[in-house]
Amino acid sequence: MSMSILIGLLNLIVEANFKEYFENLKKNKFFILLTVFFLFHAIALIWSDNLDYGLNDLRRKLSLLAVPIIVLSKPISLSKSYKLISFCFVSALLVTSIINVISYFYFSDYFSFNEIREMSRFNSHIRYGIMIAFGIPVLLEMNNSKRGYYLIIPLIFWLLFYTYISQVLTGLISLITIVFAYILFRLIVERKIKSLLFLILTSIIGIGFLLNAMLAEPDYDTSNKADFITMKTEWEKKSDMSFEGLDRRDQNLKYTLSRFLDSKQLAKNGRGVRSLTLEEIKAVENGMANVSEMQIGFWGRVEGLKYQIHHSNDPNGHSLLQRIEAWKAGLDIFKEHPLIGVGTGDVDDAFTNKYKENKSKLLPVNQIRAHNSYLTSLLTFGVLGLVLFITILLAYIKMQLNYRQVMGFVFMVLMMVTFIFEDTLETQTGITLFSFFAALYSIQLPSVKND
């Protein structure tokens, strides 16, 4: 990514049409707002103590400006140019997803995968899941003939299949968000207010049912006590991992094993351990406390999340519980610095200190940052920073509605939803993904007539 950005900037420097570049950038409202947001990061260094961390964050955030400068200094003027960009993006997704699947299902031992989400070889499984989902509307937009559907539909099914087997819940949420955004766009453009209200109401009810299902107690009996002595004897016959040690999610292995036996409705003793297959033993070693987690597809992931909710005494190794711990710490930091936040440079130190102050059970390696882009803006810059961030997003949404540009609308709604549970703008991949497509759709895309 860094090399491609440097090559893109070098291309502009070699052509040297700086006056044209400046005029194009000056008239793009999104770029101006993004520049203000970046300057906010620079200004917030003033009240930061850790300048090293702050300057490093600014260096990473430079992509927020560099990528749009490349895209918008010479905005595309031909529809075939946009289609070429779309083709390259989708092709990269198809090639990498095929490599991922082959690596996991045929070379699992070579790569030492602990769980299926690790099959994302080239990128964070979360960011990659978002891109896989967004690849579907990009594919649909690329097609302009009935014959094209014979090629497009199998590719869409492949991306859906990959999302299903990867167990990346963010991927599923992204797919649902994309469908929701498409419907929302049509209802707003066509001014169907009643239908819009019905959509919002049914979405709220649907989320309510989902939360109720997640909070429902497991239906298996957990009352029988564990006989750790006989369990240890049988475990050591089947595994080289210490019964008294930790599994690969840094949980106490004997308790993971006990809960796994519960999920299979087996006695928590040597006889229960003896009945486990080698695949199930490996699953326990990898930290799976419920047999459903071994399933291919989302149900295994859902069961894993339900387990986390009902066994929240130790958040280590559990993505949901770790996020909840991070959100609590982030809100506590904001309450102490509500007006101007802690500043760009002190975010990391503030979290480290707050985890210690709260006596968090999280191990240092699991003490993540906010994992919520809105909360990150709030605790970094205070209320004003959050207002600026949301203003940029809503202004972009309004722009897409004015352009009648569904792809840009869908992309930004997708970003806004994923910002709730991800620090997208704190990673190089997330920044590049956001800044590239947001810049691309910040202009009115050329039609076939332009060609």
Image (cartoon, grey):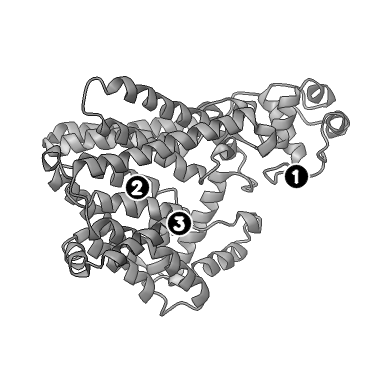
Above or below for 305 versus 155: below
Query: Disc 3 residue type?
Result: Gln
Badge 1 marks a residue whose secondary structure is loop
The disc at residue 428 is 3
The residue wearing badge 1 is 246
Residue 150 visible in this rendered orientation of the protein: yes
The residue wearing badge 2 is 415
Q: Compute the Cα span from label 3 to label 2.
A: 15 Å
Q: Residue at x 19, y 47 (%)?
A: 400
Q: Seen in the image, is 420 located left or right of residue 139?
A: right
Of residues 135 and 75, the one drawn nearer to the viewer in this rendering: 75
Of residues 47 and 59, the one drawn nearer to the viewer in this rendering: 59
Residue 278: percent from the left, percent from the top? 76, 25
Residue 340: percent from the left, percent from the top? 37, 72
The disc at residue 46 is none
* Quadrant hosting residue 174: top left
Q: Compute the Cα span from label 3 to label 1.
A: 32 Å
Labels 3 and 1: the sequence-earlier one: 1
Q: Compute the Cα span from label 2 to label 1.
A: 36 Å
Q: Quadrant of the C terminus?
A: top left
Query: Disc 2 residue type?
Result: Met
Q: Seen in the image, is 113 located left or right of residue 397?
A: right
